[in-house]
């Protein structure tokens, strides 16, 4: 039949089959699905969970091509007035969670509401 990236993502999320594990001292660390087009003019797309437990993770797309420009959402956050660099230190706090992580958490909350 016709197997899609979504089919593979479902397989990698399947705990019943033993492919996705989070018990007995072992945990699936992350999963990846790649779409490799037959047309060499099209880029390959790789989907990574980049988080443990694929059954609760969002597969995020990445394309690796020459000359790609990094967008701000994939850079580590920086803070002009970082409390860690001020004297006295840590008199205030900032949310150090990466933007992609925050969005992943929001998507996970939505997925859990749908169950």
Image (cartoon, rainbow, N blue to C red):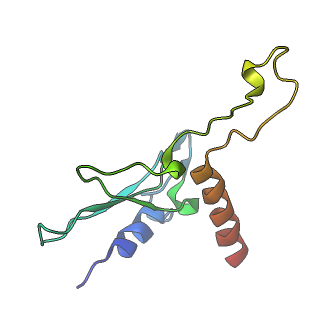
Determine the residue positioned at 21% across, 65% down: 36
For the C terminus, which image quadrant? bottom right
Q: Decide which of 115, 95 is in the foreground and name it.
A: 95
Determine the residue positioned at 77% across, 37% down: 94
Q: Decide which of 46, 65 is in the foreground and name it.
A: 65
Q: Is residue 2 above or below residue 105?
A: below
Q: Is residue 113 above or below residue 108?
A: below
Find residue 58 and report its horizontal and vertical position in percent.
Answer: 53, 62
For the N terminus, which image quadrant? bottom left
Q: Is residue 54 above or below residue 84?
A: below
Q: Quadrant of residue 32?
A: bottom left
Find the residue positioned furthest to the top. Answer: 87
Find residue 77 and report its horizontal and vertical position in percent.
Answer: 61, 39
**Residue 115 is at least partly visible in this image:** no
Find the residue positioned furthest to the front. Answer: 80
Q: Quadrant of residue 33?
A: bottom left
Find the residue positioned furthest to the bottom. Answer: 1
Q: Is residue 111 left or right of residue 47?
A: right
How many numbered discs?
0
């Amino acid at each position: 039949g016709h197997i899609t990236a979504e089919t593979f993502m479902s397989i990698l999320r399947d705990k019943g089959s033993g492919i996705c594990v989070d018990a007995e001292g072992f945990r699936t660390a992350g999963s990846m699905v790649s779409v490799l087009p037959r047309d060499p003019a099209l880029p390959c797309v790789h989907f990574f969970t980049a988080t443990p437990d694929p059954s609760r993770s969002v597969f995020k797309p990445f394309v690796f091509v020459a000359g790609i420009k990094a967008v701000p959402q994939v850079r580590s956050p920086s803070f002009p007035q970082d409390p860690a660099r001020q004297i006295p230190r840590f008199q205030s706090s900032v949310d150090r969670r990466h933007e992609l992580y925050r969005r992943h958490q929001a998507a996970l909350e939505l997925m859990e509401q749908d169950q």
